[in-house]
Amino acid sequence: MRTLFKNIKELIQVRDKSVVFVSGKVMGKLPTIKNAYLMVENGIISDFGAMKNCPKVQADETIDAKGKMILPTWCDSHTHLVYAGNRESEFVDKIKGLSYQEIAKRGGGILNSAKKLQQTSEEDLYQHTKVRLNEIIALGTGAVEIKSGYGLTVESELKMLRVIKRLKEEFNLPIKATFLGAHAVPTEFKNNKEGYLRLIINEMIPLVAEAKLADYIDVFCEEGYFSVDETGRILEVGKRFGLIPKIHVNQFTSIGGVHAGVKHHALSVDHLEEMGQEDIEALKGTQTIPVALPGCSFFLGIPYTPARKMIDVGLPLALATDYNPGSSPSGNMNFVVSTACIKMKMTPEEGINAATINGAYAMGLEKEVGSITVGKRANLILTKPINSYHVIPYTFGNHQIEHVYINGKAFV
């Protein structure tokens, strides 16, 4: 099957295979081709260039993109897409002035979601998550990482990861699974945190690895959740079982979690709303990519990741939704890019780089998606007719997507 997109007003994020992520000043550069063509063969990008060089070949389908732009689909490297119920009552509590931490102390937050999930069947959980996945694909997401962490029991954590595995099998989409048993300490271990740590280390991790249910291991390294030492213990065991580290860190406090991420060669450190200079210095020259979650900052009313400071000293940055029922109940990457530009003072070029090529790197998919590159999947966004790609973050309450293509096929 050969598909030709022709007369593309601007083909965005064209890259050589050697570029796996971009950092610092390079994040401000977004390579494009104006008046372009793009050839897709059997779901893979096979050729692209200026229209004047468009080859005269027979295509099974030709799409005239006059006035429209094409860019790679969004790469959302941090979601909690598998959950049961919702937490709209906590939304009202936030409006009335309670903080995330105060709600958690009252039995809300992660423990609230865990209770609901434990009572939900695997089939129902799958069906609800499937709806959410379809919704985010329609909004332009063409690769996604999904975490467990609302189970907090052996049975329920495995249940969540089996749902993710089933989604991988049904959707021809790059999906990465992350084991996040260390998301919170469950109520039954309230006075025995060490017991829960042993449960994660001695039972959960081996079972997850044996069943090949996860690619990554994650920990919520934060005051009131898991300390730096506890995080290190969990990550070390995860690595022994072949799970690559990631960390939730610096959401509310800076306690040394970024340094722990670098020490344990984490692929990414995520949240980073509270970043001291020492945290920024720790990331310089490493392969650990920082991931900002502006939807969470917007919803909770907490500080935004200091993107400007980080990029200006040469760091890379990825953007993700943190889609979850409590602190970021939206999987709309278009809004994330807009919010990063408006609130974090990222340029549109930086925002698009952070949400595509850098997002792909943050979940180990840099060879598969994230740029217009020969040999990568043809996971594409075809925009509506727009003046420039700056319109994408500018129209923050809407999106500029006409069609999403997954493996070269229109998603409907």
Image: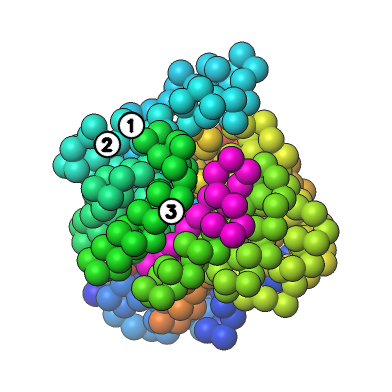
Residue lying at the far top in this picture: please name it: 96
Mark identifier at residue 118: 2
Mark identifier at residue 115: 1
Mark 2 residue element:
helix
Determine whether, in the image, residue 86 is placed left or right of residue 276: left
The crowding category of the residue bearing disc 3, from other C-alpha atoms within 10 Å (few below 14, some 14 to 19, many at least 20), is: many
Circle nearer the N terminus (3, 1): 1
Mark identifier at residue 197: 3
Name the residue rendered at 53%, 16% in the picture: 92
Circles 2 and 1: CB atoms closer than 8 Å: yes
Q: Depth-wise, is mark 3 or mark 1 nearer the camera?
A: 3
| The one of 46 and 186 positioned closer to us in this rendering | 186
Q: Horizontal and vertical percent for residue 229? A: 59, 60
The crowding category of the residue bearing disc 2, from other C-alpha atoms within 10 Å (few below 14, some 14 to 19, many at least 20), is: many
Circles 3 and 1: CB atoms closer than 8 Å: no
Tell me which amino acid carries mark 3.
Leu
Q: Horizontal and vertical percent for residue 263? A: 63, 72
The stretch of residues the image draws in magenta is 215-230
Q: Horizontal and vertical percent for residue 54? A: 46, 80
